[in-house]
């Protein structure tokens, strides 16, 4: 049976990993290539690279880094950040990315999902949604979670899947950064609404949060996190062993 | 030298890099002469079966690949490239394949329990069905990375490994010098690289 995936996410700015990372044995803690190598060796099932650079020069550095990572690391790579056009898909896929995640770009232009899915296949298009509760409703936020779009989230995600998104990343703004566990209620609502893989994001603070997630929502496919991995609070081999001990199928 | 056949579908960056990583001499080419002089061939593929076969036919490479395979040159299809080795596919209609292996490619839809998501995407364990030279450096239940919605059926003769996803789906095949992986060895970490290593070193333990 298919395994539950554990996915570290790396924020990249001007070709460097942004969040402070402190691992023994890494000579350059902000090198995306070194970190990718480290995570791959630890058993990460996939890596997400999120480009938070705004400038053209930064974009170029990002794609250079991506090429380097893809020529050394042989697990699936997903790229997000600043994806607004089919040309942006082309740019990162040529550098060895396997999937591309769209967020604000798809909110501005939902047809981007359809165009990219037709050109590269549904499996290549990941819809990433930043979701927050507003007035008792799940609401989609744009621009890195700063702007309330007014759109109801479950409807938007269903629309994205109907347009051709092959996977959905749900980042709960309500639980993000709190380290109190994943947003089970929100993720369950999304899993009930779509029949493509759903990746949980936002809220991981302890190994038990991952166990709780996969036990509470058997349909969830993967869990994504950043700082708990980068700061070494959670080691991926320990996490996967603990999941396995709890009867959750993982790749060891 | 291993030739990765480039017929205009998909991105061959990772595949090429993975062979370089294991120290194999590799080239990406659509040149019939280079393909003919290569020691081994890789047939990659993503996208829809009909389109990909159409491109192979338009370039005349389908005939060349059949000839090369019949001469005994080792050839490995990957993902859609593996599916194309079979007689036909029922993806959006009915399409003729290369016919190097007996069997046909059919949709998962309706053949696996409805609650399972399609495509079959993610890491899944290999269940060996036969001994294979491709598995020389890996073991039963090692996980590899899959992304597909169709699978090869009626291919008992060639199937060497399956993966369980509501049904035992064909994961790898081998029939003499013709072999294939439904999964992506170039995205399957060290296990995937070990399959490529076995393919590269095949004549050494033939």
Image (tube, rainbow, N blue to C red):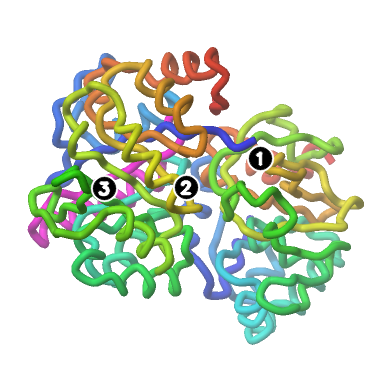
Q: Is residue A160 left or right of residue B12?
A: left
Considering every residue shown, the one lying at the far bottom of the view is B58
Circle 2 packing at 10 Å, graded few (<14), some (14-19), many (20+), is many
* Mark 2–mark 1 distance (CA, rounded to whole Å): 27 Å
Q: Is residue B33 left or right of residue A117?
A: right
Q: Chain of mark 1?
A: B
Q: Is residue A59 magenta?
A: yes
Give the number of the mark in front: 2 or 3: 2
Circle 3 packing at 10 Å, graded few (<14), some (14-19), many (20+), is many
Q: Chain of mark 2?
A: A
Quadrant of the rendered image containing residue B93: bottom right
Q: Residue at x 42, y 18 (%)?
A: A239
* Mark 2–mark 3 distance (CA, rounded to whole Å): 28 Å
Which residue was labeled with disc 2? A197
Which residue was labeled with disc 3? A65
Q: Residue at x 70, y 62 (%)?
A: B107
Q: Chain of mark 3?
A: A
The part of the chain drawn in magenta is: A44-72
Which residue was labeled with disc 1? B195
Circle 1 packing at 10 Å, graded few (<14), some (14-19), many (20+), is many
Is residue B180 in view?
Answer: yes
Q: Residue at x 78, y 44 (%)?
A: B203
- Residue A164 is situated, as x and y percent measured from the top left of the image, at 43, 66
Q: Is residue B174 left or right of residue A196?
A: right
The reply to whether discs 2 and 1 touch (Cβ–Cβ < 8 Å) is: no
- Residue B3 vs residue B119, the one in the foreground: B119
């Amino acid at each position: 049976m298919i395994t539950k995936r554990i996915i570290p996410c790396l924020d990249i700015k001007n070709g460097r990993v942004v969040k402070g990372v402190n691992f023994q044995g890494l000579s350059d803690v902000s090198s995306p290539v070194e970190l990718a190598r480290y995570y791959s060796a630890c058993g990460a099932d996939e890596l997400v690279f999120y480009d938070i650079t705004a400038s053209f020069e930064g974009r170029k550095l990002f794609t250079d880094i991506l090429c380097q990572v893809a020529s050394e690391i042989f697990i699936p790579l997903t790229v997000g950040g600043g994806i607004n056009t089919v040309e942006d898909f082309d740019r990162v896929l040529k550098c060895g990315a396997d999937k591309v995640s769209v967020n604000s770009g798809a909110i501005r232009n939902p047809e981007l999902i359809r165009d990219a899915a037709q050109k590269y296949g549904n499996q290549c298009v990941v819809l990433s949604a930043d979701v927050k509760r507003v007035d008792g409703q799940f609401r989609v936020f744009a621009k890195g979670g700063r702007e309330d779009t007014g759109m109801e989230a479950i409807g938007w995600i269903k629309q994205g899947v109907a347009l051709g998104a092959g996977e959905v990343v749900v980042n709960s703004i309500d639980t993000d950064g709190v380290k109190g566990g994943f947003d089970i209620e929100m993720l369950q609502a999304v899993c009930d609404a779509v029949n493509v893989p759903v990746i949980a994001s936002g809220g991981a603070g302890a190994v038990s949060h991952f166990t709780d997630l996969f036990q509470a929502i058997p349909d969830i496919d993967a869990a994504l996190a950043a700082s708990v991995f980068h700061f070494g609070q959670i080691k991926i081999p320990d996490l996967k062993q603990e999941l396995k001990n709890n009867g959750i199928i993982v790749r060891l | 030298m291993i030739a990765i056949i480039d017929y205009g579908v998909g991105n061959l960056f990772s595949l090429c890099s993975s062979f370089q990583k294991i120290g194999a001499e590799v080239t990406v080419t659509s040149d019939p002469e280079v393909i003919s002089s290569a020691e081994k061939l890789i047939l990659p593929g993503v996208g829809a079966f009909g389109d990909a076969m159409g491109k192979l036919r338009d370039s005349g490479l389908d005939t060349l690949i059949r000839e090369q395979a019949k001469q005994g040159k080792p050839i490995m299809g990957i993902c859609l490239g593996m599916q194309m080795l079979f007689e036909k596919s029922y993806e959006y209609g009915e399409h003729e394949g290369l016919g190097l292996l007996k069997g046909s490619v059919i949709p998962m839809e309706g053949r696996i329990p409805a609650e399972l998501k399609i495509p079959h995407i993610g890491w899944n364990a290999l269940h060996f069905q036969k001994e294979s030279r491709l598995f020389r450096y890996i073991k039963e239940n090692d996980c590899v990375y899959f992304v597909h919605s169709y699978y090869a059926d009626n291919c008992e003769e060639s199937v060497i490994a399956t993966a369980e996803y509501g049904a035992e789906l064909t994961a790898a095949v081998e029939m003499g010098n013709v072999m294939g992986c439904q999964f992506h060895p170039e995205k399957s970490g060290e296990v995937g690289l070990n399959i490529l290593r076995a393919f590269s070193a095949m004549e050494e333990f033939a």
